[in-house]
Amino acid sequence: MKRSFVLMICLTRILAAQEPPDIVSRSAVLMDATTGTVLFAKNADSAIPPASLTKLMTMHLALAEVSAGRASLDEVIPLPSETWAENQPSGSSLMFLARGQSVTLHELLLGLIISSGNDAAIAVALRFDQTVAQFAQRMNEEARKMGFLQTYFVEPSGVSEKNMTTASDFASFCREYIRLHPETLQDYHSVPNFAYPKAYNVPAAYRSRPGTIVQYNRNTLLGTVKGVDGLKTGYIDESGYNIALTAERNGTRLIAVVLGAPADSSGTRIRDNDGKQLLEFGFEHYKTVTVRPHVDSLKPVRLWLGKTNWVEVAVEHTIAFTTAIDRARTIYQKIEIDEPVLAPLDTGAVIGKLIFYDERGTLAQSAIFTTAPVEKGGFFKRFFDRIRLWWKNLTDKTENKTKG
């Protein structure tokens, strides 16, 4: 049996949804960053080399080490010969690391994201592991731990076609990345340019002419599409043009991953247009709804067969869900308790659900759970509770028949 009461919240009706965009790239996913709801997918599970999107995993692992206190953004990073720009594969994007330079981890991360430096990726990897192969293993272990079973890395820059991911995996990774490192959107991903090396980076003999090169953020949707503040672009011949995007408008943050735009002169235009279309489609037709449930209505629930007759319950303080913005003007909350609630119960035992709905159906649900354990009652308490339950069930059936 379920017992329910209804509460009400008002939301503004906006425009009706239209057909999804026509995406040219091979694969794409649009996701609500708060809830993980997928709003659009095209070939979402197709395996495609991520190219320089790989650097986001490299960045994540470096920042995890900083968060754990095992590294500092201000520390000076050694630059063995493997990290020098002159020793990177032909055609590499570069930060232009060189012999004798002094560079901090923070600067390396700027070079990793803004300049998309393959040399920076190698330097970061060798800060945390003895070899690039060992760091790649760390990347794979992290991918498995995060649940991304179709994502695999052989090196940290993205230059290899053997690195592999899917739009589905990578959108979910970006969601977790933003959750764990929200400061990076302002501190790295939306920074418009990066100048390196500066006088203090080079040996004393070169400080009067350090050869500073200014490189611009390769995400050209920054500043041109409202709300865009990340994340990363990528290209190798084997994948074509890729992009991972995020943008926030009016409390809704979206993530768009586009993989496999054509590897020709049209590729950057198609990739950027696909990304822009996805974001505009998402913001026009969906929104993240964040609700604080009416906790005053969560009265203690009748308990049977326990030492006490009532159990305290709770629901999450804030609940977020994604809805089409052309749904009903009013969203309701309905509490359903799975009766009878029987002891014994542990703390956190789910005994019902809070349902959000409108006249067209259910929008979201959240568990109602106990806040303390409840032990089983004694023999006589359980005996009389069973009699009361039997009588209650009989009375309810009689009432239902009368109503019918």
Image (cartoon, rainbow, N blue to C red):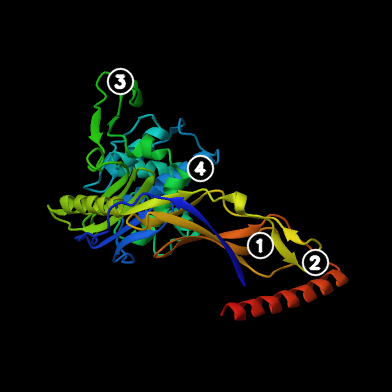
| Residue 159 seen in render | no
Gap in angstroms between the C-alphas marked 3 and 1: 69 Å
Q: Which residue is mark 3?
A: 205
Q: For the point 75% across and 76% down, which residue is it?
A: 391
Q: Which residue is mark 4?
A: 65
Q: Which residue is mark 2?
A: 376
In which image quadrant can residue 107 be found?
top left
Closer to the camera in the image, 309 or 162: 309
Q: Considering the image in quadrants, where does the C terminus appear?
A: bottom right
- The location of residue 27, given as percent across then percent down, is 27, 62
Q: Which residue is mark 1?
A: 349
Pick whichever of labels 2 and 3 is earlier in the sequence.
3
Q: For the point 60% across and 59% down, which residue is it?
A: 368
Badge 2 density bin: few <14, some 14–19, many ≥20, Cα 10 Å: some
Closer to the camera in the image, 22 or 369: 369
**Amino acid type for the residue under numbered disc 3:** Ala
SS category of the residue bearing label 2: loop
Q: For the point 56% across and 48% down, which residue is it?
A: 317
- The location of residue 403, given as percent across then percent down, is 58, 77
CB under 8 Å between discs 2 and 4: no
Q: Nearer the viewer, mark 4 or mark 3?
A: 4
**Amino acid type for the residue under numbered disc 4:** Glu
SS category of the residue bearing label 3: helix
Left or right of residue 235: residue 37? right
SS category of the residue bearing label 4: helix
Closer to the camera in the image, 240 or 328: 328
